Amino acid sequence: MENIPKELSQVADRLADLYLQSFGGKEKGRYRISEKLVRKLADRRRLYERDIRALTYLMYEKGYVFIDMDSFFVVLSANTFVNYRRVNEDSLT
């Protein structure tokens, strides 16, 4: 992805750091964050689709999944999905 604004790279760094911080009764791990707080981190009044795509890309490059849930975002480790059970053809019939 090209031409990613520096402030979005800084937001992705902060979101990745939050994954490792203790809050909400947990030592570290997955979390949700409101769109309002992401806008505040980015120092923007609005987040556009291209901004969300850029954050998704940047977070994936850092080993995290950034999921847009409309009014909030979820951050998970990409490793979370490695041990999920796999669907095979027999499961579809």
Image (cartoon, helix red, strand yellow):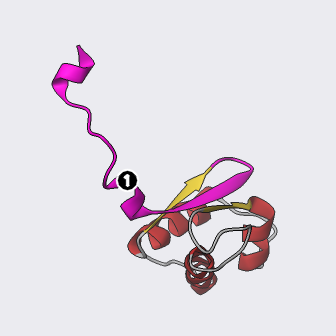
Direction from residue 56 to residue 27 in the image, left or right:
right
Q: What stretch is highlighted in magenta?
A: 69-93
Q: Identify which residue, 71 or 90, lies in the foreground.
A: 90
Quadrant in which the N terminus appears: bottom left
- Residue 58 position within the rendered picture, expressed as x and y whole percent measured from the top left: 47, 73
Q: In the image, residue 45 lies at what x, y percent?
A: 82, 68
Q: Which residue is drawn at 59% across and 61% down?
A: 52
Residue at 65% across / 57% down in the picture? 73
Dot 1 falls on a residue whose secondary structure is: helix
Decide which of 25, 13 is in the foreground and name it.
Answer: 25
Which residue has dot 1 on it?
81
Residue at the image point whose x is 75% and y is 60% from the top: 35
Asked if the magenta segment contains residue 11, the reply would be no
Q: Which of 92 and 38 is in front in this view?
A: 92
Q: In which quarter of the image is residue 37?
A: bottom right
Q: Which of 58 and 4 is in front in this view?
A: 58
**Quadrant in which the C terminus is drawn:** top left
When the figure is inspected, residue 48 is found, relative to residue 3, above or below; the finding is: above
Q: In the picture shown, does residue 89 fall above or below 76?
A: above
- Position of residue 44 relative to residue 73, above or below, is below
Q: What residue type is labelled 1?
A: Phe
Specify the farthest residue to the left.
89
Reply yes or no: does residue 75 show up in magenta: yes
The answer to which image quadrant residue 80 occupies is bottom left
